[in-house]
Amino acid sequence: MKLELHIWRQKGPREKGRFVTYPVGGIEEGMSFLEVLDVLNQNLIGRGEDPVAFEHDCREGICGSCGMVINGIAHGPRRGTTACQLHMRHFSDGDVIFVEPWRARAFPVVKDLVVDRSAFDRIVQAGGFISARTGSAPEANSILIGKETADLAMDAAECIGCGACVAACPNGSAVLFVGAKITHLGLLPQGQPERLARARAMVEAMEGEAFGSCSSHRECEAVCPKRISISTIARLNRDYIKASVARPRHASGKVQEPVGT
Amino acid sequence: MRLDPRIPEGPLESKWTRYRDNVKLVSPANKCRHTVIVVGTGLAGASAAATLAELGYRVVAFCFQDSARRAHSIAAQGGINASKNYQNDGDSTWRLFYDTIKGGDFRSREANVYRLAELSVNIIDQAVAQGVPFAREYGGMLANRSFGGALVSRTFYARGQTGQQLLLGAYSALARQIGLGAVEMHPHTEMLDLVVVGGRARGIVTRDLLTGRVEGHAAEAVILATGGYSNVFFLSTNAKGCNATAIWRAYKRGAGFANPCFTQIHPTCIPQAGEHQSKLTLMSESLRNDARVWVPGTKGDTRDPAEIPPAERDYFLERIYPSYGNLAPRDVASRAAKRMCDDGRGVGPGGRGVYLDLADAIARLGQDEIRDRYGNLFEMYERITGEDPYRVPMRIYPAPHYVMGGLWVDYDLASTIPGLFVLGEANFSDHGANRLGASALMQGLADGYFVVPYTLGEYLAGMRLEAVDPNDAAFADAKRLLAERTARLLGVRGSRTVDSFHRELGAILWERCGMSRSERALGEAIGKIRELREGFWTDVRVPGDGNDLNQELEKAGRVADYFGLAELMSLDALERRESCGAHFREEFQTPDGEALRNDESFSHVAVWEHAGDAPPVRHTEPLAFESVGLAQRSYK
């Protein structure tokens, strides 16, 4: 099959970008979308042009490296599918396809389709963990976790951190990403001691980045390649509100009086 | 090259305990004065970096991905072994140890493997405490499943994403330390050389992949946890970015390279579909718990699988290996599948495939239960092939997956260069000539969480290392060499892309140094690799320059290193005149086509020393089997 690709080309973070049109032939239906870009890049190098930069690694839909907006939809037209797992049998000969990087203020463009998603890492560094020093763990079966709870935690834990949720959100909000982590850890008994502190730290870190707020468009859920539910956002809100009204405590356990009263 | 494995004295069962009782400790006040470099943030690297930072060391960590969370450990599917014996089915530290030694076809070091089996239980405890959502029984206990090469059920799992969940656990521990300022993290940064000062590893030279900036980083010790080199074959189950550059550079700086020819071909991968294919995708071995592997009983049977009645099918693993059946180890299962296809009974395009059929299990357990166990794998298969595995049996074929070979390390995971430690798949230590399923995650985490935090202390305690500055001559030299190499790669301006060379190299290796090897083919491989390397340096085209994100330049550097590695693999395979585990030499097989070991001449680790322009030198570390008897491996 033959395709007409319109790809966003941008040399660097401060350069002006534009769409460039590339006809590509010899596409087979068993190829993945990234393999189409591979073919294009081989052609471009042959012609002495700069290949299209894009992030990719595992090509199995699990590392979260790849991500591009394909015809206006983050990761393309197939639900629950990363760009690397999108195969060309879902396209037809002669299709015109627009390919853009994630568009979000918090994810500045690095080059072509590559964006800087380090804001996600900073949010996790602020609190997206259970503090469990190596060596301090109790026997694994000493704390029971019901199958249903474990399954729900796993549903949320499947997030691959690709950033599609942010790219799809009209506000560029990261609440689905943050909600998924808060839900995963907050459902488990091991995550209880730090549950509220975690919610507060992660939400505050998120607000310190250039993400927008959630106004319940649900676009994030629609494009999430792991089909993370927006119920995780409800859990984020609940834990964050609880954390906000709970008075902070000193390490001594005594309630701290708010400053200035 | 001195190869002292430094195995502690005493009975096997108490070696590690005694080691820990006697290991030198670094005082808490001094730990923060030691800088430790960790390259790679997969299971081994992230767990090591986090744990060392918890202990108080100053850690500087590097990964080439844009985030530490994306290291390729994330793609491991099926599970992680641990001898918890929660199933009461007879498991024990000894049994996990023995299965691993036997699975590796008696080519690994007893003491290391025993320690691994011992530590396996601590890993599960640690992961659960971090919030890894392992599968559970209805009563709330941890669930298990079975993997190849074992008769007990000892594999812990999180759906088909065990590697992802374990890595996110280690990544979160690492993120916590980054947030606390105890780890300095450099994502999008690739190590391109090791710096050795006064005979000790004292730093690395890196390239920032976004800006092209080349920098030196000095430290008291360097830890490589940079994974395996299956991508030398071009088509493998590895992520596209996985590469051998870090360990290859260390080899060139004097680290011994052990058993480079021990490469694992995984039996259950989705067959290649077309010439543009960029990678191969694994279907977890865990499927073999419930699947039956078969081919048509007669050659050239092109009927739809549903139309072939059971009596006309050959369930060849069950037929040849009645006691292990579909759970025969990977090397054995891969070769059996290849034999079926060579015999003209393969299925699918080109006849390179066998069926992995879950119909019986679906009928027995119902579609819901199968979806619960393997849902994401079925989805992945459907996306790639366009076929619905709930209705049509999957087609699978072996593909390069894991490498048992790697940098040589002693019991302390220290390489032949003092101060250079190697963890996880990057070292050679625990899997002999064949790794059992669900053991890679176990090894990476054991090395990072529980081994190197002790052995690094043994190295650093009481050591007075002279201060080294990243502006010193050794760093400047390494940077200059790197700049010359980059200029050379960019300057060829030839006519062929990096990928076209890589594909050709992969094909040479796959055909001659893949599942089946012979003296003639290996000799041929070496000649062809040399020829291709010359072609590369005279005709490769690398566009752009070195001053910004240039993915072709990154690939070019890695492929340039693969030529040397491919040659070393072929040489190692040529010199090992026996068959063992995944290394199958056609000249050495039993009458029924199984691997025929030669313990008298080859019960050793082959360790290669780089010798500049001269051919590399082969050294050996003899393997002593004091606790287990050497036996002909049988899964029949």
Image (cartoon, coloured by chain):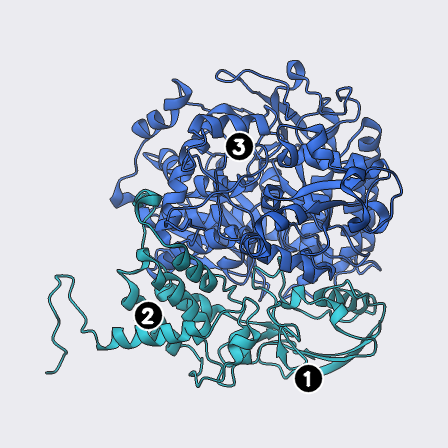
Chain colours: A cyan, B blue
Q: Nearer the viewer, mark 1 or mark 3?
A: 3
Marks 1/3 same chain: no
Residue bearing mark 3 = B430
Q: Nearer the viewer, mark 1 or mark 2?
A: 2
Side of A246 where B635 appears, left or right: right
Q: In what element is the residue under mark 2?
A: helix
Residue bearing mark 2 = A199
The residue positioned 41% from the left and 65% from the top of the image is A181
Residue B295 versus residue A99 in the image, above or below: above
- Crowding near the residue tagged with mark 1, few <14, some 14–19, many ≥20 C-alpha atoms within 10 Å: some
Nearer the observer, B550 or A58: A58
Query: Label 1 vs label 2: CA separation?
Result: 39 Å
Marks 3/2 same chain: no
- Crowding near the residue tagged with mark 3, few <14, some 14–19, many ≥20 C-alpha atoms within 10 Å: many
Nearer the observer, B512 or B168: B168
Q: Are marks 1 and 3 in contact (CB under 8 Å)?
A: no
Q: In what element is the residue under mark 1?
A: strand
Q: Nearer the viewer, mark 3 or mark 2?
A: 2
The residue positioned 41% from the left and 67% from the top of the image is A122
Q: In what element is the residue under mark 3?
A: loop
Q: Is any part of residue B184 visible from this angle?
A: yes
Count the marks: how many? 3
Query: Label 3 vs label 2: CA separation?
Result: 41 Å
Percent from the top left, x then y, of residue B14?
36, 23
Residue B334 is drawn in which quadrant?
top right
Residue A18: mark in rendering: 1
